[in-house]
């Protein structure tokens, strides 16, 4: 008789561990070069999307920022990239000879009533090497 309550408790604990809790998209001490990074997305007063990222290095980097920022839409199959800002098209995504960089990007979404997120591809490079992070934001509807 005592085994039944223990089994029920174990099943409940396993179920609780499998339930995901949404988290703010921030990395702390993600690599040898990156001390802190964050990616967020929100809506402007006119309903467009406003994506923001920041990255802080532990020293001055030759290049720091994001190589790209993807605007992703959620559908029944999962997250699909609707648009990608690249450092070739938007040079402000990257900075040189700095230890901190951030940028804000505005995008008019194709499906205004859908759920979106931004994924920043964080990048830091110095003479010793390169560090990268793939950093999705929390979603916004």
Image: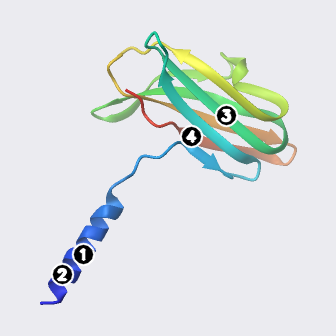
The residue wearing badge 1 is 9
Looking at the image, tell me whether mark 4 or mark 1 is earlier in sequence order.
1
Dot 4 surroundings within 10 Å: few (below 14), some, or many (20 or more)?
A: many
Disc 4 or disc 1, which is closer to the eye?
A: 1
Quadrant in which residue 121 is drawn: top right
Q: Locate residue 115, reporting x and y percent.
A: 36, 28
Drawn side of residue 1 relative to residue 55, left or right: left
On the image, the x and y values in percent for residue 27 come to: 61, 47
Residue shown at 62% from the left, 43% from the top: 133
Task: Give the residue at the far front of this rendering.
Answer: 45
Labels 3 and 2 touching (C-beta < 8 A): no
Asked if the residues shown at circle 4 and circle 1 are in contact, with their CB atoms under 8 angstroms apart, the answer is: no
Label number found at residue 29: none
Q: Looking at the image, do the residues carrying marks 2 and 1 touch, with CB atoms under 8 Å apart?
A: yes
From the viewer's perspective, tell me whether residue 119 is left or right of residue 13. Answer: right
Residue at 56 percent across and 40 percent down: it is 135
Mark 3 or mark 2: whose residue is earlier in sequence: 2
Q: What is the spatial separation of the Cα atoms under label 4 and label 1, in whole angstroms?
A: 35 Å
Label located before the other in sequence (3 or 1): 1
- Quadrant where the image shows the C terminus: top left
Q: Secondary structure at mark 1?
A: helix
> x%, y% of residue 72?
44, 28
Q: Circle 2 is placed at which residue position?
A: 5
Q: Earlier in the sequence, mark 3 or mark 4?
A: 3
Distance (Cα) linking label 2 and label 4: 41 Å
The residue tagged 3 is 54
Q: Nearer the viewer, residue 58 or 72?
A: 58
Question: Residue 68: percent from the left, percent from the top?
Answer: 61, 28
Tag 4's secondary structure? strand
- Disc 4 target residue: 135
Residue at point 36% right, 16% down? Answer: 112
Mark 2 or 4, which is nearer the eye?
A: 2
């Amino acid at each position: 008789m005592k085994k039944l309550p223990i089994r029920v408790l174990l099943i409940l604990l396993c179920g609780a561990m499998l339930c995901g809790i949404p988290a703010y998209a921030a990395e702390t001490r993600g690599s040898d070069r990156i001390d802190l990074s964050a990616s967020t997305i929100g809506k402007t007063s006119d309903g467009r999307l406003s994506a923001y990222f920041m990255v802080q290095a532990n020293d001055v980097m030759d290049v720091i920022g994001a190589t790209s920022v993807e605007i992703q839409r959620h559908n029944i199959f999962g997250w699909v990239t609707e648009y990608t800002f690249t450092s070739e098209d938007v040079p402000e995504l990257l900075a040189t000879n700095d230890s901190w960089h951030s940028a804000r990007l505005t995008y008019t979404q194709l499906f205004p009533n859908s759920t979106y997120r931004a994924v920043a591809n964080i990048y830091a490079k110095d003479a010793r090497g390169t560090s990268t992070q793939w950093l999705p934001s929390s979603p916004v509807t």
